[in-house]
Amino acid sequence: MNIQLRGEVLEKALTLEDAVNNLVLLYLGIKKEDRRAVGHKSGTLTYKNLLDLLYDIDVLDKKEFQTLLLLMEVRNQFMHNLACDSFEKAIEFLGPDKGKRLLKFNDIGGNTLEDQYSNSFLCLATDAIHIIGEKIEKKQKDVSEKSTYLLGLLDLANNYDKLIHDKIDTLIQTYTPKSNPQNDVEAENSTVKAFMQIDLLELKHEFHKKFEEMAADLYKKSEYMAIRLIDGRQYDAT
């Protein structure tokens, strides 16, 4: 049965499966411990279901999806097929096309076909883990940058709200209509209105200035995030 080889294949597959689970949890924002859909308990979504989901929400492209799926297809032969005691047997069951695809990952070489398949699987596992690792790192950075941006907006809104209240308090204290009946109320109202318009215009310019400063700072830190959050466009790294 070649238990040692099965164990080596399973180890790599379990590492990848756990990473894929973590990636899905991160993208869906799930922190609940008692989960029913994503996890390692009976009845949760299968590895293939999770790959389909990641592909559907554009986290994985087609090539990445096929890479991750190929590893699990090889793994399944070792785990569920008693007669599968070598990589050559696994490819025999999977078909020659899967064998050709697997060999394309081989950056090590090998004296025999079994060695070549074995080294190819090792390279495949390395590439698969790298794919998921990069996705997790990118999403974590995305969450962090969004949080910073939203906190910046909140701080800007709080400061703007304080400025407005300070201006209103100043106007009230400075331009409270006098009780003298001879006073020209209409003229006083016009004066107050004019000063309010000036102050509001100044506040508007101040808000725009602060927002532009915050946006410029975000562009310096991450052009990708600035384009997504401020411009509303898709970022093309090419």
Image (cartoon, helix red, strand yellow):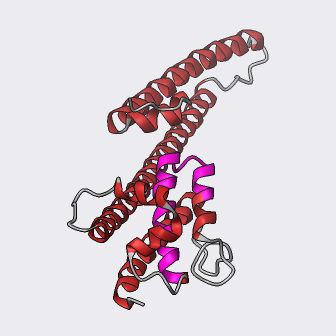
Determine whether, in the image, residue 36 is placed left or right of residue 28. right
Q: Residue at x 33, y 56 (%)?
A: 105
Determine whether, in the image, residue 131 is placed left or right of residue 171. left
Is the residue 232 above or below the residue 64 in the image?
A: above
What is the quadrant of residue 178 in the picture? Answer: top right
Is the residue 234 above or below the residue 187 in the image?
A: below
Q: Position of residue 205 (x, y in %)?
A: 50, 20
Q: Residue at x 60, y 16 (%)?
A: 195
Q: Is residue 9 visible?
A: yes
Q: Position of residue 110 (x, y in %)?
A: 22, 65
Q: Position of residue 6 (x, y in %)?
A: 40, 84
Q: Residue at x 50, y 66 (%)?
A: 20
Report the predominant secondary structure element of the magenta stretch: helix
Q: Position of residue 215 (x, y in %)?
A: 43, 31
Q: Nearer the viewer, residue 41 or 14?
A: 14
Determine the residue located farthest toward the right in the rendered image.
Answer: 181
The residue segment tinted magenta is 52-79
The quarter in which the N terminus is drawn is bottom left
Q: Nearer the viewer, residue 26 or 15?
A: 15
Residue 237 highlighted magenta (yes or no)? no
